[in-house]
Image (cartoon, rainbow, N blue to C red):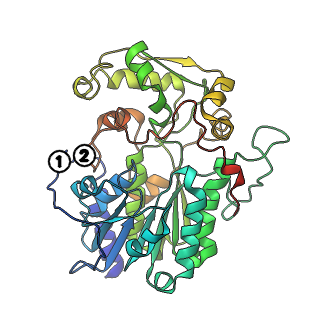
Amino acid sequence: PIPMLASALRTSATKFARTAFPTTRRFTNTSTRLMSVTAGSDKIVLVTGSTGRVGKEVVARLSQIPGFTVRAATRDKAEYATSLGAHETVAFDLEDDKTWAPAMQGVTHLFSSTQDKFIGQHMAFAKWCGETESIQKNLHHVVRVSCFGADTNTNAYDSETHVSRSNAGIPLMLQHYWWSEECFIAAGFGKKLTVIRGNFYMNHLLKNELESIKNDNTFKSPLGECKNSFVACNDMGEAAVACFVDGVERHGDKFYDICGAQSTSMGDVAAVLTKALASAEAKTICPEAAGKVITYQPQDVNQFEKDFGTTRAEFFEYLQNGFYSRCSPDFYNLTGHKPMTYYEYLTQKGAAGDTGLAELFSAQGAIFTKGVDQFKDLKDVKK
């Protein structure tokens, strides 16, 4: 009966896959407080990064599944998190360890998502969770968002061996993605850990090119003609929710590579974006770019390094050498259907109520600024 129930719940969850969700939701005022278990619910899920591109999908999907109380961790967007469907909101800041204990009170399930620059604080949080007796006892399942290419748990990558260049190591950012998983294993959560390893997110490479798209009908990138299987944030969220619903018994100590349905070059991206900008929604979302034909302009990698720093530029080299070109069956095996294509992501609403086109022209995921190397100190972070 229990496996049948889990299967039924997952079927219900995956029905959300291509459903058009409302753009607005009933808002219930909540405040930061010490949380208590919601009546009738036996699973309390703390969703970190709850208002980000993946977290918002996790909140919107999981909040509709019976048996889960969704607690959205946020610095300053409690109202938006509640509008997504969160049952509770709580202040949480990796840079402020005083927020950790109230946020984790009674938590049985953790969705872990962290910006790259906070790897040091993330590792400290995982270590703290392992050293806190009540959390070690009560936390049944951790689903971590990561990226494939550097781990020594399911693979035997050598950190000193670059995939396509002699006398070089694996890019630091890739190593840090592995560290973000490894710290949970070291903290004693290995059998309770599921990792959703995504490719680069669709739209991510365009976030710093929006003004050029709107004003000049172009965007620049150093990736050239290499095709990469960029992943939809919606699919990352759906995969995570499927793992929560199926349970740790099925997905504990499991690691999944999540990619898009097809590999695309920068020229392909320009063509798909042009098609999406011809839609009716584009006139509302981005009137300055609506109806335009967008073209791709190759960018000198040295200029890209000047714009964003050595650490990010080194990571982008893996998007130029074919390492992230392949598509993976893992999303299909988790959900029973194909992942999204780029055009589908741009034009279809996710569980959170917006399309990928709306996400592209929003502030979500706009975490890089030209001329600012936010990773310049990451070389000093140690495990």
Label 2, label 1: how far apart the Cα atoms are: 7 Å
Helix, strand or loop at disc 1? loop
Q: Do the residues labelled 2 and 1 touch (CB within 8 Å)?
A: yes
Q: In which quarter of the image is residue 365?
A: top left
Seen at 38% across and 55% down, the residue is 55
Tag nearer the camera, 2 or 1: 1
Residue 28 image-quadrant placement: bottom left
Q: Which amino acid does label 2 sit on?
A: Gly
Q: Which three-letter amino acid code belongs to the residue tagged 1?
A: Thr
Tell me if residue 229 can be seen: yes
Q: Residue at (59%, 57%) from the top-left corner?
A: 119
- Vertical relation: 101 (above or below) 149: below
Q: Where is residue 19 in the image (x, y as percent from the top left)?
A: 24, 48
Relative image position of residue 26 (x, y in whole percent): 14, 55
The C terminus lies in which quarter of the figure? bottom right
For residue 195, side relative to residue 110 (left or right):
right
How crowded pointer 2 is (Cα within 10 Å; few <14, some 14-19, many 20+) is rated as some
Residue 372 placement: quadrant: top right
Q: Is residue 371 left or right of residue 242?
A: right
The residue that mark 1 highlights is 24
What's the residue at 59%, 78% (across, down)? 188
Indicate the quadrant containing the N terminus: top left, top right, bottom left or bottom right.
Answer: bottom left
Q: Which mark is residue 52?
A: none
Residue placed under numbered mark 2 in the picture: 353
The percent coordinates of residue 166 (x first, y second) are 84, 39
Q: Can residue 338 be seen in this view?
A: no
Q: Is residue 226 left or right of residue 331?
A: right
Q: In this view, does 84 lie to the left or right of 123?
A: left
State the image coordinates of residue 9 (x, y, percent, origin top left): 29, 68
